[in-house]
């Protein structure tokens, strides 16, 4: 009897001691918001305030890309893939209405506009440049410059031409040259107007959605292929960086990649198995990025599912800055059933957004800490909330911006913040239902209206814009 009691006690201690240690050393960060003064903000001189968008989500008129085909059912499974069978169609008509949208940016007081250029419009066929499409982006940059707003250009934001998709896109390392060729054309057209360049937006989000969950085109569910595509996207970033830097004007360009640091946390902090699972998934989603760009070593590993590793030795020398997108975290709970275990869960006890995650400003502070190990200036390239009722946006903005200010105060090198997004737009597989815009868009009339909650952003930007020459 005594022996059993001792064994049980030892087993309990063996479980509780490491758990208690981890809870102490790696707690899921939570702040006491009641004791925080949200107006206690300070930003350095020249801090960049901006808004962000992406071509396929706002421009309208996309016909020849992976997404148009995915929406219209032209992939081999022959069915449309967007919630409620929506299609982007005219989107926000940003292609034609960009002058009006630039006026909205002026109304907000921002100094930077991050947008992506549409590869499928600029290169509708392999090797063919549409000079009218390219000129469109020159005109956008000139219109921005005329009112003192700097463009920040993303070269790949989930969208590419169908001809590239049909060649296997980034599944094949030999296709990277096509992306370099496209980037070369855009750089030569815009280099005198654009300082900040983002090569690829959220590689891990794209890969998980397109090759693991199957919600983005090409809708495959192949973890090993997902890990290969992620590796090729990192290699594509390196190739584009090195090529653009070698061109006239390359030395002036600031080139980075954009990482969405979405943390995975244990649903139950007292469960070692939840912690282990969360850590393993985190290592794949976030850790693979960090080790590639810090150590030059890519590894994506998940027991029984995937193991892909390769040196990408040049990666650490190819970041002038790092773009950080941050929205939230999710929880994970261990289950012997792998499908069940890999379900992402809303983190318990927090206010939900309209997406499948909660409001978690502390996570932005953590993400800044996590990405700062790369030793590069950080620019927040996206942060925002889907909130159709607009009953959480104002508070969201104040808390997340407080987290940025606190990180800067604590010594982290954050140079800018871009709100996602200027207007409501097409949220990929979820269609038009998710309302991220500072401006509400009535898609029947294209009327834009500033939301009440967005006025917090406008107020903060106006109070904390301290450009020496503006
Ligand atoms: O809309 C997306 C964007 O395209 C990439 N980052 C996250 C946003 C909101 O989900």
Image (cartoon, rainbow, N blue to C red):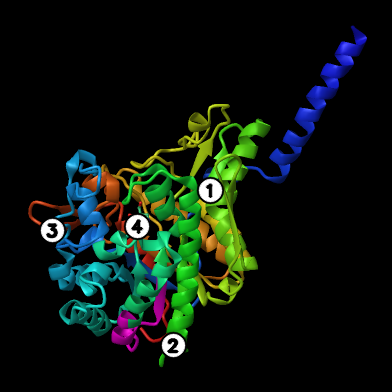
Which disc number belongs to residue 90?
3
Magenta segment includes 197: yes
Q: Foreground mark, 1 or 4?
A: 1
Real-space Cα separation, disc 2 to disc 4, in angstroms:
37 Å
How many C-alpha atoms fall within 10 Å of the one at disc 2: few (<14), some, or many (≥20)?
some
Q: Foreground mark, 2 or 4?
A: 2
Magenta range is 185-199
Real-space Cα separation, disc 4 to disc 3, in angstroms:
29 Å
Which disc number belongs to residue 250?
2
In this rendering, the answer to whether 410 lies above or below 361 is: below
Real-space Cα separation, disc 1 to disc 4, in angstroms:
26 Å
Q: Considering only order in the chain, which callout, 3 or 4, is on the residue closer to the N terminus?
A: 3
Task: Report the residue marked by disc 1.
Answer: 263
Q: Position of residue 151 (x, y in %)?
A: 32, 77
SS of the residue at dot 1?
A: strand
The residue shown at (41%, 66%) is 200
Real-space Cα separation, disc 1 to disc 2, in angstroms:
34 Å
SS of the residue at dot 3?
A: loop
Residue 395 in view, yes or no: no
Asked which quadrant contains residue 189, the reply is bottom left
Q: Is the CB of mark 2 within 8 Å of ligand 1? A: no
């Amino acid at each position: 009897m005594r022996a059993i009691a001792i064994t049980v006690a030892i087993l309990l201690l063996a479980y509780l001691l490491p758990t208690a240690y981890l809870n102490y050393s790696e707690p899921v960060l939570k702040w006491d918001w009641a004791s925080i003064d949200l107006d206690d903000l300070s930003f350095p001189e020249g801090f960049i305030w901006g808004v962000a968008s992406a071509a396929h989500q706002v421009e309208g008129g996309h016909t020849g890309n992976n997404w148009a085909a995915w929406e219209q059912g032209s992939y081999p499974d022959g069915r449309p893939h967007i919630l409620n069978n929506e299609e982007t169609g005219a989107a926000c008509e940003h292609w034609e209405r960009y002058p009006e949208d630039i006026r909205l940016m002026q109304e907000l007081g921002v100094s930077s506009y991050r947008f992506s250029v549409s590869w499928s419009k600029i290169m509708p066929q392999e090797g063919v440049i549409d000079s009218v499409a390219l000129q469109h982006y020159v005109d956008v940059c000139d219109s921005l410059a005329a009112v003192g707003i700097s463009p920040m250009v993303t070269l790949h934001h989930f969208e590419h031409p169908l001809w590239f998709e049909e060649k296997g896109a980034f599944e094949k390392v030999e296709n990277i040259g096509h992306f370099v060729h496209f980037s070369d054309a855009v750089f030569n057209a815009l280099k005198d107007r654009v300082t900040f360049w983002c090569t690829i937006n959220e590689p891990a989000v794209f890969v998980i959605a397109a090759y693991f969950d199957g919600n983005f085109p090409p809708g495959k569910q192949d973890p090993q292929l997902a890990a290969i595509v992620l590796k090729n996207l990192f290699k594509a970033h390196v190739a584009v960086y090195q090529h653009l830097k070698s061109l006239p004007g390359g030395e002036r360009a600031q080139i980075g990649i954009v990482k969405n640091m979405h943390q995975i946390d244990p649903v139950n902090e007292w469960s070692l198995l939840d912690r282990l699972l969360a850590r393993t998934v985190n290592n794949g989603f976030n850790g693979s990025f960090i080790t590639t760009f810090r150590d030059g070593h890519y590894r994506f590993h998940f027991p029984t599912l995937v193991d892909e590793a390769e040196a990408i030795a040049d990666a650490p020398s190819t970041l002038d800055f790092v773009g950080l997108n941050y929205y939230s975290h999710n929880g994970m709970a261990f289950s012997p059933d792998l499908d069940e275990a890999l379900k992402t869960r809303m983190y318990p006890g927090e206010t939900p957004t309209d997406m499948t995650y909660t409001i978690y400003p502390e996570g932005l502070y953590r993400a800044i800490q996590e990405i700062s190990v790369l030793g590069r200036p950080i620019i927040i390239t996206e942060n925002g909330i889907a909130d159709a009722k607009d009953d959480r946006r104002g508070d969201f903005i104040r808390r997340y911006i407080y987290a940025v200010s606190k990180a800067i105060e604590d010594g982290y090198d954050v140079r800018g913040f871009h709100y996602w997004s200027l207007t409501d737009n097409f949220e990929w597989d979820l269609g038009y239902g998710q309302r991220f815009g500072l401006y509400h868009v009535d898609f029947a009339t294209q009327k834009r209206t500033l939301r009440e909650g967005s006025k917090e952003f406008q107020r903060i930007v106006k109070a904390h814009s301290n450009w020496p020459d503006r």
